[in-house]
């Protein structure tokens, strides 16, 4: 049986480390500490959005960001009254209406989203709370940074909307420092122009996890933290964050096979000697060895991935799992819901616990989460 096991102790440790680092900067112009906005998209990066959000609240986090309308409303339905920012703009009137009625902070990223939100606010006689998104060179949601006159004109038409924040998103802060700094300067230039035109900007936030760790001078009024809470960072883990979640399963069968025995789909593996093997009840259904599609638009990306794959072949790296503290090699192809491993010479029994991996981001939400 697949099970995601989550350590409360290690998660709490990460929360405290992140809070400490966020507030090492000088307070902002109003004397406030840097606000932490916890991003809980993708089922809270695999931790389980409801229990995870409630745990963060108990440990001093009171502002959250989600990627979908469904997640925003789900949190409210579960009785979570904390601040919730929807990072994706919404242009369907019925959805905007539900969000405004549930006190969700909306993202305004275009003239269209601005008009619809303003109309719903007037219809409901409620002032929608919004954050303005500026596209500083990501090519995603947001007013384009170079078209400031249009952005100013659109925002000046606000009649029934309250701007509580303004933000952007970095495209490659985990490896391209130069471009990240360019995006940051574009954002700050836009903020200056907005203020010069008497447009309130609210709290400012630009940092995702990588930028948060690498560029403390960019923390501004708030930072958006996602995978760092679970101890997974793309840049150097200088904060000493701990991995908090693991996929676990069990040994469901043990048997001996002779030399020349095929294992797995397509006969890709044949034993070179007599082996004792164990069958584990997990596979692609537990996101084990799932190959997420690679973005290879640039030549340098293609070369990087090619070199990685060549290194993998020549080093004869093997997939591993851990059973009772013993490392075991995976044999053959990973199946949909099973893995075969070599346990020759090891003390392993039926139903022994198996730790498969800590990459729980893409594990289906139907798999049970256990907090300990």
Image (cartoon, rainbow, N blue to C red):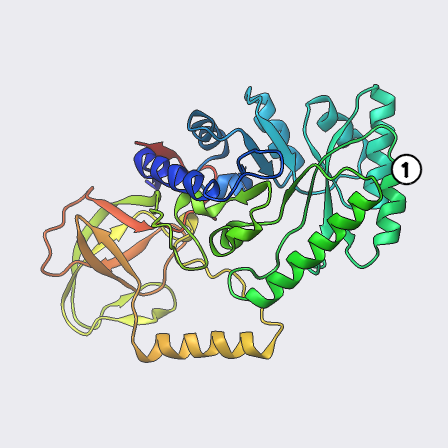
Rendered location of residue 3, percent (x, y): 34, 39
Indicate the secondary structure of the residue bearing disc 1.
Answer: loop
Q: Which residue is drawn at 64% across and 52% down?
A: 169
Mark 1: few/some/many CA within 10 Å (<14, 14-19, 20+): few
The picture quadrant where one finds residue 4 is top left
Q: Residue at x 48, y 42 (%)?
A: 22
Rendered location of residue 34, percent (x, y): 54, 38
Rendered location of residue 225, percent (x, y): 51, 44
**Residue 149, above or below 31:** below
Q: Could one spot residue 43 in this view of the protein? A: yes
Q: Could one spot residue 142 in this view of the protein? A: no
Quarter of the image with the C terminus in it: top left
Which residue, given by chain and number where applicable, does mark 1 sit on?
Answer: 157
The picture quadrant where one finds residue 82 is top right
Quarter of the image with the N terminus in it: top left
Q: How many labels does the image show?
A: 1
The picture quadrant where one finds residue 236 is bottom left
Rendered location of residue 124, percent (x, y): 83, 20
Drawn side of residue 259 relative to residue 149, left or right: left
Q: Residue at x 54, y 63 (%)?
A: 293
**Residue 162, above or below 1:** above
**Residue 168, above or below 64:** below
| Front residue of 86 and 215 | 215
Drawn side of residue 354 relative to residue 99, left or right: left
**Residue 297, above or below 123:** below
| Front residue of 134 and 343 | 134
Q: Which residue is drawn at 45% across and 59% down?
A: 235
């Amino acid at each position: 049986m697949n099970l995601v096991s989550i350590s409360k102790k290690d998660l709490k440790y990460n929360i405290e480390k992140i809070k400490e680092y966020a507030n090492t900067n000088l307070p902002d112009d109003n004397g406030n500490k840097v606000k932490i906005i916890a991003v809980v998209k993708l089922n809270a990066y695999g931790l389980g959005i409801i229990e995870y959000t409630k745990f963060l609240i108990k440990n001093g986090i009171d502002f959250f960001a989600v990627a979908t309308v469904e997640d925003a409303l789900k949190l409210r339905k579960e009785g979570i009254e904390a601040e919730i920012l929807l990072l994706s703009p919404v242009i369907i009137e019925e959805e905007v209406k539900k969000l405004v009625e549930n006190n969700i902070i909306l993202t305004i990223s275009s003239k269209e989203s601005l008009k619809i939100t303003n109309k719903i606010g007037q219809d409901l006689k409620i002032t929608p709370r919004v954050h303005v998104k500026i596209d500083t060179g990501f090519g995603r949601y947001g007013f384009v940074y170079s078209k400031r006159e249009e952005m100013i004109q659109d925002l000046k038409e606000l009649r029934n909307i309250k701007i509580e924040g303004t933000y952007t998103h970095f495209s490659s802060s985990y490896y391209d420092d130069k471009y990240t700094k360019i995006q940051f300067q574009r954002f700050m230039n836009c903020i200056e122009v907005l203020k010069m035109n008497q447009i309130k900007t609210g709290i400012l936030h630009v940092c995702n996890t990588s930028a948060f760790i690498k560029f403390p001078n960019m923390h501004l009024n708030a930072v958006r933290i996602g995978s760092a809470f679970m101890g997974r960072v793309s840049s150097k883990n200088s904060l000493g964050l701990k991995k908090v979640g693991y996929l676990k399963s069990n040994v469901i069968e043990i048997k001996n096979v002779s030399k020349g025995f095929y294992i797995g789909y397509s006969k890709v593996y044949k034993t070179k000697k007599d082996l004792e093997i164990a069958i584990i009840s997990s596979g692609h259904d537990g996101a084990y060895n799932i190959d997420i599609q690679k973005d290879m638009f640039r030549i340098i990306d293609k070369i990087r991935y090619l070199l990685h794959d060549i290194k993998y072949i020549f080093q004869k790296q093997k997939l591993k799992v851990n059973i009772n503290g013993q490392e075991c090699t995976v044999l053959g192809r990973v199946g949909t819901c099973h893995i075969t491993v070599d346990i020759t010479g090891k003390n392993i029994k039926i139903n022994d616990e198996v730790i498969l991996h800590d990459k729980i981001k893409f594990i289906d939400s139907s798999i049970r989460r256990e907090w300990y």
